[in-house]
Image (tube, grey):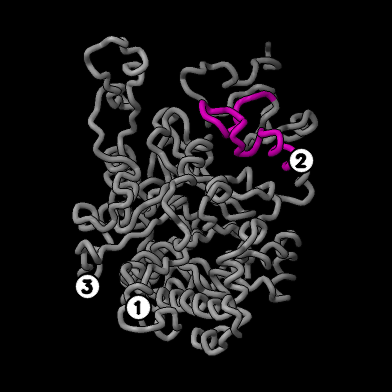
Amino acid sequence: MRIMAQMSMVMNLDKCIGCHTCSVTCKQVWTNRDGMEYVWFNNVETRPGLGYPKTYEDQDKWKGGWIRKSNGKLKLRAGGRLKKLLNIFHNPDMPSIRDYYEPWTYEYDMLLNAPANSPHVPVARPKSLLTGKDMQVTWSANWDDDLGGSHEIAVHDPILKEMNEKVQLEYEKTFMFYLPRICEHCLNPACVASCPSGAMYKRIEDGIVLVDQDKCRGWRMCISGCPYKKVYFNHKTGKAEKCTMCFPRIEVGLPTVCSETCVGRLRYLGLVLYDADKVTEAASVENEHDLLAAQRDCFLDPFDPEVAREAERQGIPHDWVIAAQKSPVWQLISRYELALPLHPEYRTLPMVWYVPPFTPIVDEVAKTTPDPEDHRVLFTALSKMRAPLEYMAHLFTAGDTKPVEKALRRLAAMRSYMRDINLGREGNEEIAKAVGMTGEDIEDMYHLMSIAKYEDRYVIPTAHAETARELDEIAMQGLGGCSLESVGMNGPGIGADGPGLGLHGHKVSPTQRASDPHTPSTPGRTNLLGWTDKKGLAGMFPPQTGLAGA
């Protein structure tokens, strides 16, 4: 048993109101700069819909993720080393800018400088941020926002095309819900396996998947390899970039920017302990319907004394084990079994999970029963939800409706059980027993799902106890975190260029600079992640001093 820790996230889709606050704040912190105009590390999609980029879930077209061979082993859907070598200068499986959208701005000078007495109304025409030319806006990252039930959008949804039953799209029976997406930071990431230069890597300490900007050569195989299309190409630097799960904030115990600013408080962050020896086996199960159970089987119970002792023996800090025991993510995934992974059939073992939406059904059943909130009525009415079980099953459980129905039954049980308590009656244990739980379990689940405090939703241990104070100081100064006050890389919040900054933007002391061979020896060195040709060559290379023969 090889125990490792994974920083993970769960999102409760019942609480997402589609305000896009998470997307905007993430954009301002991470991708508000040259070359990243079209990039949204965090985006919120309306389902049914095409997604971002368009139809990214159509793996017959994009060749993302893994497939299982007849001998039980996995291989990349896009092909192995030989095929990648043959296509290294022309990748046919990569989305084009038209599949994302061509970013634009508006010619605001036409409005600001128009003569006051002009007989014509000034117009701010859209201008392409890529070419600078006039353009016609036809698509964007959330162009189909709130149009999930329309005939124009829904009929092109890749999931609807796979469903056995035809989903009713009449006006009065349409359905939609919001799906926020970030990088999944998978246990078996296809992007890491796809990278020819070895620039993509998964951090050992917390499982966050990152890109080494020094090693990246811009082959973009990671983009086609990722089935969620959450790796992007910076056309200014020629490097791949992706969601970092705000690792500078995570290292000092702070939640990601998207979590911190979420209006609906739908996100949960916490550690999950897992057995790394089981990952390949879990991703290789033959039946796609078994992938969910296989991945859950990888997760270890942090309350098991043997697991806790072995985790510390293998180098996981004691405070991390305690954090894993308090983790809301482990509670939602393994204890309550409410959270489900996004597209487990890709076999990447994603680690951003979702609580499926409990769409409105009370009005529907109220037509035929006097008490639509009764648990027995709610249980039997799940099939009448506007969002079909089959659709959510294709999203979260590779088409198996049983885990989705189980999660929704428990949400319905919590709703009915807590109604009695809120009305001053005793909790009905029969309700809890009907979904395989106890009344205490349901009350604990209610506390976590409905009224959880900040410290209950985000249980994030600091990177290392011995450096926690230094990292916290860095974050407070806005140097190594994602604060909106620090400026770098032509956009707020990156905290890159500047004297005294080393790897990941962390402040470097003179002692560390002199003793650490991995730290640049010269103050003021340019961070290659933020370099553009406009900055020139100053700081790109160390001074030419001390050379032999000089």
Residue that label 2 marks: 470
Q: Which comes sooner in the sequence, label 3 or label 1?
A: 3
The picture places residue 185, in percent across and down from the top left corner, at 50, 54
Q: Helix, strand or loop at disc 1? A: loop
Tell us which disc is closer to us: 3 or 1. Answer: 1
Name the quadrant containing residue 452. Answer: bottom right
**Extent of the magenta region:** 471-499
| Distance CA(mark 3)–CA(mark 2) | 57 Å
Q: Which comes sooner in the sequence, label 3 or label 2?
A: 3
Q: Residue at x 32, y 74 (%)?
A: 364
Residue that label 1 marks: 366
The picture places residue 134, in percent across and down from the top left corner, at 25, 23
Q: Is residue 18 visible?
A: yes
In the image: residue 74, left or right of residue 201: left
Name the quadrant containing residue 272. Answer: bottom right
Q: Amino acid at mark 1?
A: Ala
Q: Helix, strand or loop at disc 2? A: helix
